Image: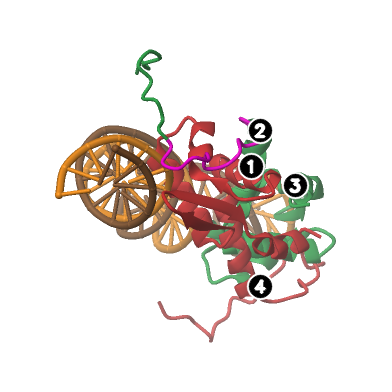
Chain colours: A red, B green, C orange, D brown
Amino acid sequence: MSVDLELAPKRKRPAGEPCCEPVAHPDIEREQAERMARTAKALGDPIRMQLVDVLRRHAGKVCVCELVPLFDLSQPTVSHHLKVLREAGIVGCERKGLWAYYYVNPEALEEVRRWLK
Amino acid sequence: MSVDLELAPKRKRPAGEPCCEPVAHPDIEREQAERMARTAKALGDPIRMQLVDVLRRHAGKVCVCELVPLFDLSQPTVSHHLKVLREAGIVGCERKGLWAYYYVNPEALEEVRRWLK
DNA sequence: TACGTATATTGATGAGCGTCGATCTGGAGT
DNA sequence: ACTCCAGATCGACGCTCATCAATATACGTA
């Protein structure tokens, strides 16, 4: 667990030139990387990708009872995926009586969108 | 496993109106969703996000020996993350002597970028 | 009050992931 | 030949994930 600072191994490079010029940023935006990775991870499942896609196409808010039959999955599983998207801030929901209406939070995708240039 | 088509339960909606108008596309581009989800999943880890970010900033090709010290991780772990990115088609690599140079495959991110509008 | 209905939550199970130390591969220097 | 080094692969570990059936919650209707 301890590191030898003395007796450093002298780094003999095999050839004359170094392998490459040093990389620009030694350690870059870890926070931003974590935020964007969280978003990407939530989108990293085909079901969730399709859920977001449906919600984006459908400008308004969509009821869960319309979403469930689109997939060959149990209702609890769809509910679980919606929860993952909710916790990633990608979608929001609004309950009205018995029903729950979901919608996309466009700002949640903005950062990744911009990063992708 | 079998479904009753007779004796359908009559779907008494609690109120007069249905919960919402039917969703536009009954089942949309599953293939595209799977492709994009695979890309998003590969980006869904902060380390891999930073790796891609470094490679994108650095226009040329970057040697692994420059990448490893950027993270507080063992060399095998970094190598593993690079492999995940490689298998997702997000980065490519080119060996030259002892060293391996990695670079970003911009087309791999294109589809997701366009989908994010 | 009691019942049905739309979603959410729970608990279990099997598969997958991130990480490490150890080992393997193969090019370069002596 | 032998050694050193960069990088990849392997095997094992704990942890997380996707899924389901069963149950809970909470609202509407009679």
Q: Where, by quadrant of the figure, is residue A92 drawn?
A: bottom right
Give the labeled residue for mark 3.
Answer: B115
Q: Assess disc 2: are there few (<14), some (14-19) or many (≥20) residues with their C-alpha within 10 Å of its C-alpha.
A: few
**As rendered, which of A25 and A106 lies closer to the eye?**
A106
- Residue A35: give x, y in percent of width and height: 60, 67
Which residue type does callout 1 highlight?
Answer: Val
Which dot, 3 or 1, sits closer to the camera?
1
Q: Residue at x 64, y 71 (%)?
A: A32
The answer to whether any part of residue B61 appears in the image is: yes
Q: Is residue B16 above or below residue A61?
A: above
On screen, residue D30 versus residue A62, left or right, reads: left
Q: Residue at x 65, y 50 (%)?
A: A60
- Of pointers 2 and 3, the one earlier in the residue sequence: 2
Give the labeled residue for mark 4.
Answer: A11
Q: Residues at marks 2 and 4, common chain?
A: no
Residues at marks 4 and 1, CA–CA distance in whole angstroms = 55 Å
**As rendered, which of B117 and B6 lies closer to the eye?**
B6
Q: Secondary structure at mark 4?
A: loop
